Image (cartoon, rainbow, N blue to C red):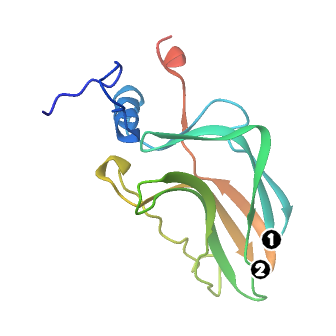
Amino acid sequence: MSIKITDGRGSAAHITSNDIVGKQQASLGTESCVYAVGNKFAYTLVDNNTIEIADGEGSIYGCFWRILPETVEEVTLTTGTQGVCRYDLIVARYTQDATGVESVSLAVLEGEEAASEEEAVAPGITEADIRDTVQTSEYALYKVFINGINVESVTSMMTVCHSLQTACK
């Protein structure tokens, strides 16, 4: 049977994360985004190797994830090399293991070192609709420019999605 009720009680446990993601994609769209709630994953540069990401609510292709209110997650950057530049990305990474267990975590994708900022290129990310039973999908939160051993800039890569309440006004 190809028809399935997902908001009603069935004869056995039957609602999957794929059902929930499908509903959220239908309601909120398929784009990954950050919601206008909490601190919207604001960053704090602790030192040249540490960035803290504040609380917020987000979606990776309809999979809702969050950093709990009034908490932070810490990411560690690899120390730069004197005389070269690179761009790193801080991403939210959705994964599904071989047993079907899903999770979201923060990760740093390290770019290639280059002689100048103009030659430095940010690494690519894995973007895929998680309803297609992919194992990994990433959403870029920040692009970090490292000049030598110093973090020189942190640029938001996020799209902020507003609530349906705001959209209906």
Res 141 visible: no
Query: At x 33% / y 46%, what residue is drawn?
Result: 131
Res 55 visible: yes
Query: At x 62% / y 84%, what residue is drawn?
Result: 113
Q: Which residue in the rendered view is the most extreme toward the right?
A: 47
* Amino acid of disc 2: Thr
Which disc, if any, is residue 49? 1
Asked whether disc 1 touches disc 2, contact meaning CB atoms under 8 Å apart, the reply is yes
Residue 142 vs 24, above or below: the answer is below
Q: Dot 2: within a 10 Å radius of its alpha carbon, few (fewer than 14), some, or many (20 or more) residues?
A: some
Where does the image place residue 166, in percent across and percent down from the top left? Answer: 54, 17
Where does the image place residue 158, in percent across and percent down from the top left? Answer: 57, 47
Left or right: 3 as drawn, with respect to 25: left
Q: N-terminal of the two: label 1 or label 2? A: 1
* Amino acid of disc 1: Asn
Where does the image place residue 57, in percent across and percent down from the top left? Answer: 61, 37
Q: Name the residue tied to disc 2.
A: 79
Residue 13 vs 154, above or below: the answer is above
Quarter of the view holding residue 162: top right
Query: At x 83% / y 70%, what residue is drawn?
Result: 48
Q: In the rendered image, which quarter contains the N terminus?
A: top left
Residue 32 vs 133, above or below: the answer is above
Q: Secondary structure at mark 2?
A: loop
Is 51 or 71 nearer to us in this picture? 71
Where does the image place residue 19, in percent across and percent down from the top left? Answer: 34, 35
Q: Which residue in the rendered view is the most extreme toward the top?
A: 169
Is 41 or 71 nearer to us in this picture? 71
